[in-house]
Amino acid sequence: MSAPTVDQQVSLASAVRQYLRASERYEQATDEFNKACSDIRAHDLREVRLVVQANYRHWLLEINAQGDFEVEQIQLI
C-alpha cells in the first residue's frame, strides 16, 4: 500500500470537509422534514383533499383514512 501524495492528501481533505458539510445539511433537512410531517399529522385529519398555496405554487394535499398523506404540485386553472 503506497502513501498518498501531498496533492492527494489535500484533495482528500477537501473532499472530507465537503462530505462533513453535506452531512450536516442532510441531518438538518431530515429534522426539518420530519417536523413538517409531524405538524401535518398533528391536525389528525382523515380522507381530506385540500389545495394549498405555498412558495407561489399550488399543491394538492391528500390525506387518506389511515392518516397517510401525499403532497403534489398542481396547475391551477
Image (tube, rainbow, N blue to C red):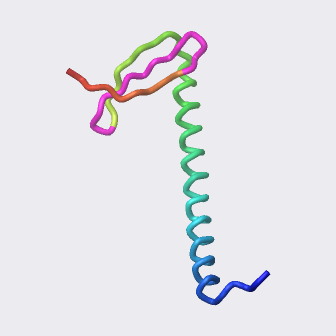
- Above or below for 41 versus 49: below
x and y, in percent, of residue 32 in the image: 54, 44
- Above or below for 31 versus 18: above
- Residue depicted at 24% across the width and 23% down the height: 76
The quarter of the image holding the C terminus is top left
The furthest residue to the left:
77
> Does the magenta portion include 60?
yes
**For this view, does 38 lie left or right of residue 48?**
right
- Above or below for 1 versus 17: below
- Residue depicted at 60% across the width and 59% down the height: 24
x and y, in percent, of residue 4 in the image: 69, 84
x and y, in percent, of residue 71 in the image: 44, 27
The furthest residue to the right:
1
> Does the magenta portion include 22?
no
**For this view, does 77 lie left or right of residue 69?**
left
Between 49 and 17, the residue placed more toward the observer is 17
- Residue depicted at 62% across the width and 82% down the height: 8
Between 22 and 65, the residue placed more toward the observer is 22
**For this view, does 71 lie left or right of residue 9?**
left
Number of marks present in the image shown: 0
- Above or below for 2 versus 71: below
Q: For the magenta stretch, what is the residue range? A: 55-68
**For this view, does 17 lie left or right of residue 56?**
right
The quarter of the image holding the N terminus is bottom right
